[in-house]
Image (cartoon, rainbow, N blue to C red):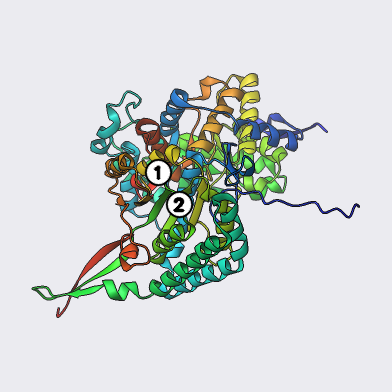
Amino acid sequence: MFQERFVRGHGGKKIPIPYYPIDQVGADERAQFFTKRSIKKESKINALYTIISMIDLTTLEGADTPGKVKQMCAKARFPVPRGVYQDIANHPKAKALPSVAAVCVYPSMVPHAAEALEGTDIQVASVATAFPSGQLPIDLKVADVERAVEFGATEIDMVINRGAFLSGDYQTVFDEIIQIKEACGDAHLKVILETGELVTYDRVHFASQLSMLAGADFIKTSTGKVQPAATLPVTLVMLNAIKDYYKHTGVKVGMKPAGGIRTAKQAIAYLCMVNEVLGSDWLTPDLFRFGASTLLNDVLKQIYKQVTGRYYYDKIFSLD
Amino acid sequence: MSAKEQPVIKTIKLFINGEFPRTESGRSFAVPIHGSEHIYANLCQASRKDLRAAVEAAKEGLKSWSGKTAFNRAQILYRMAEMLEGKKQEAGQILEDVQGLSKKDAEVEVTTAIQVLLYYAGFADKFSQVMASVNPVSGPFHNFTTPEPVGVVGFLADTGFSFWQWMDRLAAILCSGNSVVAVIGAPGAALISLIGEVMATSDVPKGVVNILSGDINELFTPMASHMEVQSICYWGEDQTKISQLHEQATENMKRVVYKYKPQSLESITAFTEFKTIWHPVGV
């Protein structure tokens, strides 16, 4: 069952990558387990505030405009307008509302985001490398990344070459990630596996290892354009890969599930999972992110519910 | 196989989003057979989380229901009457069992409930013409006012139950295009499955009608304070609750309706907002 595959690294050095089957039923069962945790009261409030600080607030639409990106950046800074949050800010259960971790946009929108977020700690993440398909020659992918960084992106979300990966050409996938990593410079690199297209957990696990060996700072499940996007079991498989990688190299790689995480309840299940697989070290925006847009409003809704006792609805905060 | 027949008794559950789920809380309460120690049925005792789920369903249901033409809403209300007609005997029997009504009285209750549905079916595409107006204004504007559905309506039945009066309020709420989350306590709650079946087979989109059986006192505050509920129809006499309702309704300016006139135009407009439009002319 156990096979060893390899890629050639710097100077033609052979780098072995173990490829072994993942117990799909086991992973699904185990992941299901995290949805049944009962996180209540104070722990819940803490989790909700933590989730906000881990969100990569995302808009990746053809219809994105500078105006929309600016509006989203304003929301990223103050998820609830400060004057409005004053209503509950002094309540004993409420805390200072954090900003989100980053905004995630297309390269052409990066200048607008960078301008709107100047002087804040919020990162500007840009998808690049012919997102979401990744079907462009490598030189254009590199140019895509370089331009995004030049525009002010501090994080790059790249997609792997799934065509190469699925046809067994792991070397190309590996080399591309290395080239993109170089093009990133100081910007953090998140590698999107697009697990929905990889289909099996074996491949997801293998692709995770491949990406980390090539220098990924984060591994990310999906573009959000392919179904299924992030699921608990697929994230579990990736977290285990991160754990193994940390054990062998001492390097902490981050995780970003993206796509399909819409409710606070789902997000809390992810936090439980990260905590139990990787430990509390990973419960920080530096090592764990949610790629999401509607999640933020649901989390705010739950915070308001916890604090005021009233049921709120998400559109009360903003329309998207 | 033995020839002896095994009776199959209907499990009475909640009605949320076009489905018949059990309460997430796993609780139940007993509805006794009237004047007896025996139990008619054990019903789901809905929790505030069921209420939350119902309101979310109603919010979605509102989109399709309020977007339908008034004529189509009329057809569907009429269809409800048709479906209830088919369940006349079953409904009558439940009322006899749990409310202790005589066969005749129970029949009157159900027949009246059907008539009530017809009444509002008739009004659905007419009340707007009666209530809307073209307003004379001083200026180059065409100014007109029309009634619009208010939104998600919470319907709390906190009184002795009368089937037709309950149906009257439900139909009045639905007539203008609102969606509804209704809470019924014992003994009326025994009808919840039957009403759900009528709704589910009458082409009313899922989520438009949601019915919970449970304790009004428990669900009162979550309903009254819910920010997504735009109006509350309170059917009861409890003055403390009425003043609490007014208090809790202020946060999102809910309309509180507790005075009610059955089979009337006022009952429809109680659950509408009036929208006035200023349209420039001559420019």
Q: Judge by depth and name the residue closer to the eye, A86 or A114.
A: A86
Marks 2 and 1 on same chain:
yes
The amino acid sitting under disc 1 is Met
Q: Is residue B123 visible?
A: yes
Residue A178 figure quarter: top right
Task: Please identify the residue farthest to the bottom as the structure is shown.
Answer: B282
> Crowding at label 2, few (<14), some or many (≥20) Cα neighbours within 10 Å?
many
Secondary structure found at label 2 = strand
Residue A291 spot, x, y in % from top left: 48, 40
Q: Is residue A58 left or right of residue A131?
A: left
What chain does badge 2 belong to? B
Q: Judge by depth and name the residue closer to the eye, B48 or A150.
A: B48
Q: Which residue is mark 1?
A: B223
What chain does badge 1 belong to? B
Which mark is on residue A299? none
Residue A292 spot, x, y in % from top left: 47, 42
- What residue is at 59 percent from the left and 65 percent from the top? B88
- What residue is at 69 percent from the left and 46 percent from the top? A199
Secondary structure found at label 1 = helix
The amino acid sitting under disc 2 is Val
> Crowding at label 1, few (<14), some or many (≥20) Cα neighbours within 10 Å?
many
Mark 2 vs mark 1: which is more N-terminal? 2
Q: Is residue A12 left or right of residue A275?
A: right
Residue B107 spot, x, y in % from top left: 55, 64
What quarter of the picture does the N terminus of chain A occupy?
Answer: top right
Q: Which residue is mark 2?
A: B181
Residue B2 spot, x, y in % from top left: 90, 52
Total marks in image: 2
Question: CB under 8 Å between callouts 2 and 1?
Answer: yes
- Measure the alpha-carbon separation of dots 2 and 1: 9 Å
